[in-house]
Image (cartoon, rainbow, N blue to C red):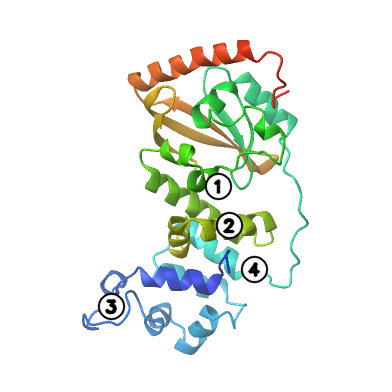
């Protein structure tokens, strides 16, 4: 099951927690499998082993908030992981999948993106598809992709797919493994919040089949949010550059987020300035081409 469920999440979380971390002693060191046993989780959470097994097997779908919070405490989940636990526990399997719909950038978001001229910026959809980008954002993130690509849903760049399946995009990241794990953790977080998203299910299934690294990272069960951080790139046009990024969520459409980049040091600032000159040259040469921001 590509998008996973409550049982899978609980199993992966207890598998990475050893008895000493959980405060258990006297259980010896010889264990057939790593992590906590189901009976140990049940004991620490104050529920019967039989009841916990039913939860993990999906046979009990009405666990109380108190039980879920106890499990979060035992498994030492952070806030994001706890929210994900509740998302999975409250999932209604009878709910039909949502009809497919094409994401469209709002005029307000496009107007704001167009007003950002001195920094690279990208407007991202729910699954980190590029809905629009300014010239600098395009040249920084994916200069080998046509600038007009986000305007057509059929050619719209999907950053998670590119990170695993596009050699040029993948090769630009100096810390590819860190970047990839962050993307996978975010996709798993989305899978809990939007279990009826058919596009997301298909994306995860495709990447699990086509890339062993993605499949292994997905199987780890890790979830995470990412609203700010740094990227270390080896850019095909300007060489090595380190950039900070911040994600801004639209109040009227929280699924869409704007990612804005800034250089972290003078060397990177000089590199982005060079990218700005390339932007000017590109714009001059493409005046007759329609823009996805128009």
Q: Picture coordinates of residue 70 (x, y %)?
A: 46, 72
Q: Quadrant of the C terminus?
A: top right
Q: Secondary structure at mark 1?
A: helix
The circle on residue 275 is: none
Q: Is residue 215 visible?
A: yes
Local packing at callout 1 (Cα closer than 10 Å; few below 14, some 14-19, many 20+) is some
Q: Secondary structure at mark 2?
A: helix
With 231 as the anchor, is 109 left or right in this view?
right
Q: Earlier in the sequence, mark 2 or mark 1?
A: 1
Q: Earlier in the sequence, mark 1 or mark 3?
A: 3
Q: Nearer the viewer, residue 26 or 181?
A: 181
Cα separation between marks 1 and 3:
42 Å
Mark 3 touches mark 2? (CB < 8 Å)? no
Mark 2 touches mark 1? (CB < 8 Å)? yes
Q: Is residue 197 visible?
A: no
In front: mark 3 or mark 2?
2
Q: Which residue is mark 4?
A: 91
Q: Residue at 59% of width from left, 63% of height from top?
A: 87
Q: Picture coordinates of residue 178 (x, y %)?
A: 38, 47
Specify the quadrant of the image occupied by residue 174: top left
Q: Residue at 51% of width from left, 79% of height from top?
A: 56
The circle on residue 161 is: 1
Mark 1 touches mark 4? (CB < 8 Å)? no
Q: Residue at 62% of width from left, 42% of height from top?
A: 129
Cα separation between marks 3 and 2:
40 Å
The circle on residue 206 is: 2
Q: Which residue is mark 3?
A: 24
In front: mark 1 or mark 3?
1
Cα separation between marks 1 and 4:
26 Å
Give above or below for 12 relative to 116.
below
Q: Picture coordinates of residue 289 (x, y %)?
A: 70, 19
């Amino acid at each position: 099951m590509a998008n996973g469920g409550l049982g899978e999440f609980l199993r992966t979380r207890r598998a990475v927690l050893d008895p000493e971390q959980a405060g258990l002693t006297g259980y010896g060191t010889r264990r057939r499998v790593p992590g906590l046993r189901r009976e140990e989780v049940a004991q620490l959470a104050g529920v019967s082993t039989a009841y916990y097994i039913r939860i993990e097997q999906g046979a009990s779908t009405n666990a109380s908030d108190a039980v879920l919070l106890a499990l979060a405490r035992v498994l030492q989940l952070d806030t994001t992981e706890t929210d994900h636990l509740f998302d999975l526990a409250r999932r209604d399997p009878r709910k039909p999948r949502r009809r497919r719909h094409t994401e469209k950038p709002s005029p307000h978001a496009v107007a704001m993106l167009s007003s950002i001229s001195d920094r690279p910026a990208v407007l991202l959809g729910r699954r980190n598809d590029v809905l629009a980008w300014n010239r600098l954002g395009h040249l920084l993130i994916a200069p080998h992709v046509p600038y007009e690509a986000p305007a057509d849903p059929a050619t719209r760049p999907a950053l998670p797919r590119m990170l695993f399946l596009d050699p040029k995009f993948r090769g630009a990241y100096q810390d590819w493994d860190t970047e990839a794990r962050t993307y996978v953790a975010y996709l798993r977080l989305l899978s809990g919040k939007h279990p009826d998203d058919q596009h997301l299910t298909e994306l995860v299934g495709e990447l699990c089949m086509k890339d062993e690294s993605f499949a292994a990272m997905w199987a780890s069960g890790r979830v995470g949010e990412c609203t700010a951080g740094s990227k270390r790139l080896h850019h095909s046009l300007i060489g090595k550059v380190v950039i900070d990024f911040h994600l801004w969520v639209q109040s009227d459409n929280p699924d869409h987020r704007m990612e804005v980049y800034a250089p972290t040091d003078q060397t990177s600032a000089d590199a982005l300035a060079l990218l700005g000159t390339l932007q000017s040259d590109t714009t001059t040469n493409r005046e007759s081409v329609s823009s996805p921001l128009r």
